[in-house]
Image: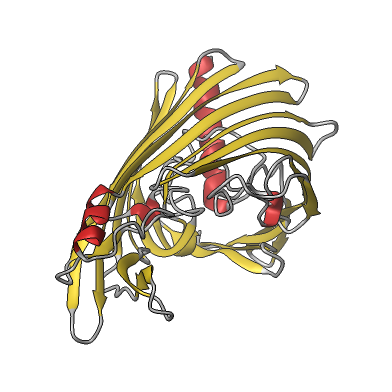
Amino acid sequence: MQNNKLRMAIRATAAVTVLGLASQAQAISFTAGDYDVSVYGYARMNASYDIDNNQALSTRSGSYSGLASDDGKDGHFGADAVQSRLGVKTVSPQGVAITVEGDFRPGNLRLRHAFGSYNGVLMGQTWSNFSSFVGNTATLDFDSLPGLAGYQARTTQARYTSGPLSIALEQPNSSIIAAGLDDDGDPAVLDVDGKDSMPAFTARIEDSNDGMSYSAALLAHQVGYDSGSNDESSFGFATFVAAKMMLTDMISLQGTLSYSDGANSYLYRSGDNFGAPSAYVDSSGDVETISGYGGSIGAGVDLGGGRSINIGYGMVEVDWDDAEDEAADAGFAGILGGQSETNSAVMANYKWTPVKNVMMGVEYQFLKRENVDGSDGDANRLLFAAQYNF
């Protein structure tokens, strides 16, 4: 019985992941000619109170960019409804499925999903194949915990899926930095204009067995730049594993582990807020990769009656040692001190469904950032959400 329930939950999770419905209870379905059409979405309000430091992004998610120190002003309230979304899915008589979905983050209409699929072949924009939601703990924070499995974002891709295995070629994502001088002649960390010469390759397996669901994936891409006088590149890769186990019909335990070398853009929430730099340019002009790792663990308790409690912890750390040594050799020692080295978070929430298709919840968050030079900052936050599905 428990295994059947888990398999049903995994299938539902997979459907939500592909369509990007995110807590969608049901859709408005109808037939137009020979096409089956579904319209779905929700209206959502998020409100936050930052007890110390103003860390709210759009959707009131907590940010790491302002946690370089504890100098921020205390006590900030804010609310918005930009997470609200609307999507349409159609299925042709031949079985071709097309989905287009958008939301309003950070304040204007934004494309989330636009893809078609047929016989296991998917093309368009949707969740990166280098992502999994199997090991994620449910949070009210839209950006959630650091250290989750993979990119946790949407990208343009061509994907083929057969059973539990899926492979894809995707739009690559990376960043390169170098030590140099800013416009005022002061030592600074400079962004280097990267060059993408090939797509990112991803492969993922996701399945369930004997009361456990699991996922593992690998990503490989090229990290390079072309300044006109120098054309250099290096190889970067990332990998993750994720799992969820139903300890009882009411209690789940889930977690993720990630590692990257030259692909920190895919190490979730590892930089100032999301991906950290993937590589740096050394004094010889060569591209040297930067490594990092992360993970998360959490538990969910179904209290019945549409009520649940969820608690999770996530952490990522980036290894800046080699880049620091190179900066010192190039005469710019210390300029990497303000880069984020470790980001971590604890999130705990209570969610309930007072009536069908309505979710409300409250969440406590503790965010912490530690920089390369040893400086740090933290923030306590409260989040409230109300979501109305259709």
Residue at horizontal 70 percent and vertical 42 percent from the top: 52
Residue that protrudes farthest toward the bottom in the picture: 228
Residue 376's spot in the image, x, y percent? Answer: 50, 42
For image coordinates 70% across by 24% down, the residue present is 308
Give the camera-side residue of 53 and 200.
Answer: 53
* Residue found 50% across the figure and 64% down from its top: 115
Does the image show residue 196?
A: yes
In the rendered view, does 30 fall on the left or right side of 339?
right
Residue 36's image quarter? bottom right
> 117 above or below 238?
below
Image vertical order of residue 351 relative to residue 88, above or below: above
Res 350 → quadrant: top right
Task: Inspect this view and state whether residue 217 appears.
Answer: no
Q: Position of residue 96 (x, y in %)?
A: 50, 62
In the image, is 376 to the left or to the right of 231?
A: right
Residue 200 placement (x, y as % from top left): 30, 62
Image-quadrant location for residue 209: top left
From the viewer's side, name the closer residue of 67 and 390: 67
Q: Nearer the viewer, residue 98 or 82?
A: 82
